[in-house]
Image: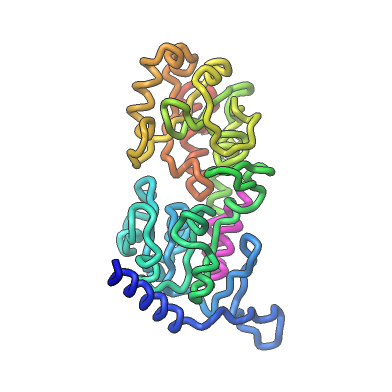
């Protein structure tokens, strides 16, 4: 343990000495201003980079997939915290980026990649109990970027938090354009946003009055989506009414009796690649639903109206659009919406 502690001290010293403190950003519009050092306002602080990052580490899958979608694999030196397989169209690029950890990496591991920018999707990743506080990285001269979707319009009162304002795609689009700006690939950011919006515009909504519940995980007291997170976007874009839209918690835990009282027409089921608690896997969800005396009487269960999505599709990210399309296709298959 003494050797490990000494190694960590040396590592922090080397990283701290090797990177100067963040300089003040250049004033916009100054004659001869070439754009760097560049500052982007992010979650109450300025993210300052001296030049376009060349050694980025992304600590959550959602952030990783944005960077890969921007064609930045060659400027990434590490990823971590994966919940699902990477999107198929990003798999080849992802293979070229080292995976530092499937789950949360240690601070030493992240620093060992010598990053010049660290990105994350969740406050818990760059906060207490996460990889490290943002201030810790800043003191070491490593700027950090946090997804606006997890810090704006949201109260961090629990692990998943509660929202004061419904999540919108605008916050996801801002994350894309912020990162494209920092990496000096603004046109790629604009193109990615335009492509996502075009896909949303092509979705046909469900017939009026169709209700749904979004089950993420846990069998005993299930996590069902509240009104205002990523499933709220999916519901709005597909014309569904979430039966738990009366709570602002992103993922409130409810009883099955409450689910039965609200009796949704459709169940959106997350098939999680992780296997940490009962109800992560799709198979365990369906087995429970069809064998439990309470849930087996749900209208959606009796008609087997299940729409399957990945866990990542229910997090604020480019995968939210994947979730919209999967739910829209499922509704069409059940005759609850017109074909696209």
> Left or right: where does residue 61 sit relative to residue 92?
right
Residue depicted at 69% across the width and 80% down the height: 27
Q: Could you say which is closer to the camera, residue 312 or residue 13?
A: 13
Q: Could you say which is closer to the camera, residue 30 or residue 113?
A: 113
**Residue 184 is covered by the magenta coloring:** yes
Residue depicted at 65% across the width and 29% down the height: 246
What colouring method underlies this structural image?
A: rainbow
Q: Provide the major secondary structure of the magenta segment.
A: helix
Q: Residue 183, how many percent across, how many down?
A: 51, 71
Q: Residue 130, how many percent across, how many down?
A: 46, 56
Residue depicted at 53% across the width and 45% down the height: 199
**Residue 263 is covered by the magenta coloring:** no
Residue 256 lies, with reference to residue 32, above or below; the image says: above
State the extent of the magenta-drawn residues as a range: 169-193
Q: Residue 163, how many percent across, how many down?
A: 64, 43
Tell me where residue 40 sits by quadrant: bottom right
Note whether residue 264 is visible: no
Q: Residue 172, how many percent across, how many down?
A: 57, 52
């Amino acid at each position: 343990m003494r050797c490990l502690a000494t190694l960590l001290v040396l590592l922090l010293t080397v990283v701290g000495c090797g990177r100067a403190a963040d300089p003040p950003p250049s004033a916009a519009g100054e004659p001869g201003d070439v754009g760097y050092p560049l500052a982007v306002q992010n979650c109450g602080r300025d993210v300052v980079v001296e030049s376009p990052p060349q050694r980025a580490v992304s600590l959550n899958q959602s952030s990783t997939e944005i960077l890969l979608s921007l064609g930045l694999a060659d400027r990434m030196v590490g990823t971590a915290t994966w919940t699902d397989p990477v999107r198929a169209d990003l798999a080849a690029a992802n293979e070229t980026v080292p995976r530092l950890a499937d789950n949360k990496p240690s601070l030493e591991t992240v620093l060992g990649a010598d990053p010049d920018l660290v990105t994350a999707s969740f406050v818990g990743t760059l906060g207490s109990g996460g990889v490290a506080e943002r201030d810790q990285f800043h003191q070491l001269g490593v700027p950090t970027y946090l997804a606006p979707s997890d810090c704006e319009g949201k109260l961090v009162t629990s692990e998943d938090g509660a929202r004061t304002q419904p999540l919108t795609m605008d916050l996801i689009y801002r994350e894309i354009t912020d990162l494209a700006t920092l990496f000096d690939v603004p046109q790629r950011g604009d193109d990615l946003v335009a492509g996502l919006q075009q896909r949303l515009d092509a979705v046909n909504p469900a017939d009026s009055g169709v209700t749904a519940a979004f089950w993420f995980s846990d069998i005993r007291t299930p996590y069902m989506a509240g009104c205002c997170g990523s499933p709220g976007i999916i519901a709005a874009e597909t014309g569904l009414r979430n039966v738990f839209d009366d709570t602002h918690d992103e993922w409130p835990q409810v009883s099955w009796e409450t689910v039965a009282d609200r009796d949704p027409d459709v169940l959106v089921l997350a098939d999680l690649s992780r296997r940490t608690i009962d109800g992560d896997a799709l198979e365990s969800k369906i087995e429970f639903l069809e064998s439990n005396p309470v849930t087996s009487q749900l209208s959606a269960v009796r008609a087997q109206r299940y729409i399957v999505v990945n866990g990542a599709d229910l997090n604020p990210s480019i995968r939210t659009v994947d979730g919209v399309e999967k739910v829209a296709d499922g509704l069409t298959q059940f005759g609850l919406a017109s074909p696209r």
